[in-house]
Image: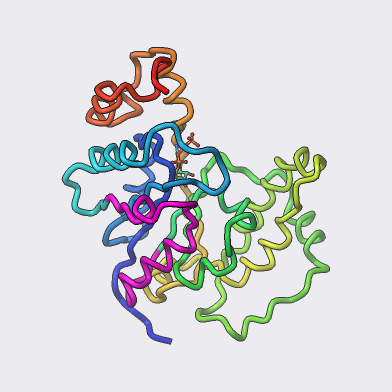
Amino acid sequence: MTKPQTQPIGILGGTFDPIHQGHLQIALIALQQLHLQKIHFIPCFQPPHRNQPIASPNDRLAMVKLAIGNNTAFNADDREIKRGNISYTIDTLKSLRQDYPDTPLCLIIGTDAFQELQQWHHWKELIDYAHLVVMYRQTDQPQQSNALIENKFSGLEQIDSSSLEFPLGGGEPSLRSVLCIHDSSKRGSQQRGKPKCEECIFTWAQPHVTEDISDLSHYRKGVIYFLMINPILISATKIRNKIKARSQNLKNELPGKVLDYIKTHHLYSANSK
Ligand code: ATP
């Protein structure tokens, strides 16, 4: 297999309804920690697993552009909006791979998204096109002992690693921790009939996890890496609720130009659609 030495490109997808300082902070952290050459912010057209965003695709894209400003390491990428329909990440990765055939790509997702990866369209194929970088928040503490998890997974089939494109890494404890949280926090919803997916994700992910950050630039795709970050307690939902409640206190949560755009276009207020 070829070993590119090109700096990877990061991919940060989302509804960005609106883009906020939490998004910009994780992008900056990823840029520095993962030694990325740039990050593509990709607002979706229609997210697969949730309702249509409140703001229009063009407004969300405009806000991403304003937030990025003239930072040349950040790129507002409109491919999902241009494509229309449901925004499946696998289609976006295929399209990026065509644009960047030789460059390592890092799809950046949160722990929560990773825990529900099995619900993504063609989820097992994602790492055929990119690496997966899971932003692991420091408050995401394991809720069960490793011994318990070890016991739980001991009966699972061994993975055939002969087809892997990179050496096995030592990131298993992080993987266990992440799925451990899922196991504990989702117990209630599983009882209500949701699929139990952590075993399946564990089995699939285990041979791809690495703790060696240089694997992200040595290989173009196929590695799963956990990046520890401090929690950034901002969400677009909270911001939209604050705007609806006419809160004036959004300066720390939104870039100034995004706040101005929201005000000028009357987005998210009680009087808007
Ligand atoms: P909403 O509240 O509407 O669900 P959001 O604030 O989570 O929105 P998204 O556009 O859905 O924003 O998120 C895009 C990506 O950014 C996701 O991978 C999400 O996990 C991540 N993200 C969003 N907010 C934060 C945050 N405060 N800290 C770390 N990651 C975040």
Q: Is residue 267 left or right of residue 208?
A: left
Q: Position of residue 178 (x, y in %)?
A: 62, 51
Q: Is residue 92 magenta?
A: yes
Q: Position of residue 32 (x, y in %)?
A: 31, 54
- Identify which residue, 217 or 195, lies in the foreground: 195
Q: Is residue 95 magenta?
A: yes
Q: Give the answer, above or below, for where 159 lies relative to 239.
A: below
Toward which corner of the image does residue 169 lie, by quadrant?
Answer: bottom right
In this picture the colour scheme is rainbow
Identify which residue is drawn at 50% across, 73% down.
128
Q: Give the answer, above or below, for where 136 lies relative to 101.
A: above
Q: Give the answer, above or below, for where 53 lies relative to 196.
A: above
Q: Is residue 198 left or right of residue 93?
A: right
Q: How many marks?
A: 0
Identify which residue is drawn at 50% across, 65% down.
211
Query: Residue furthest toward the left?
Result: 70
The quarter of the picture where the C terminus appears is: top left
Q: Position of residue 191 (x, y in %)?
A: 82, 42
- Identify which residue, 39 or 94, lies in the foreground: 94
Q: Is residue 203 left or right of residue 27?
A: right
The quarter of the picture where the N terminus appears is: bottom left
Toward which corner of the image does residue 129 lie, by quadrant?
Answer: bottom left
Toward which corner of the image does residue 124 lie, by quadrant?
Answer: bottom right
- Identify which residue, 7 or 264, lies in the foreground: 264
Q: Which residues are magenta?
A: 76-105
Q: Position of residue 23 (x, y in %)?
A: 38, 41
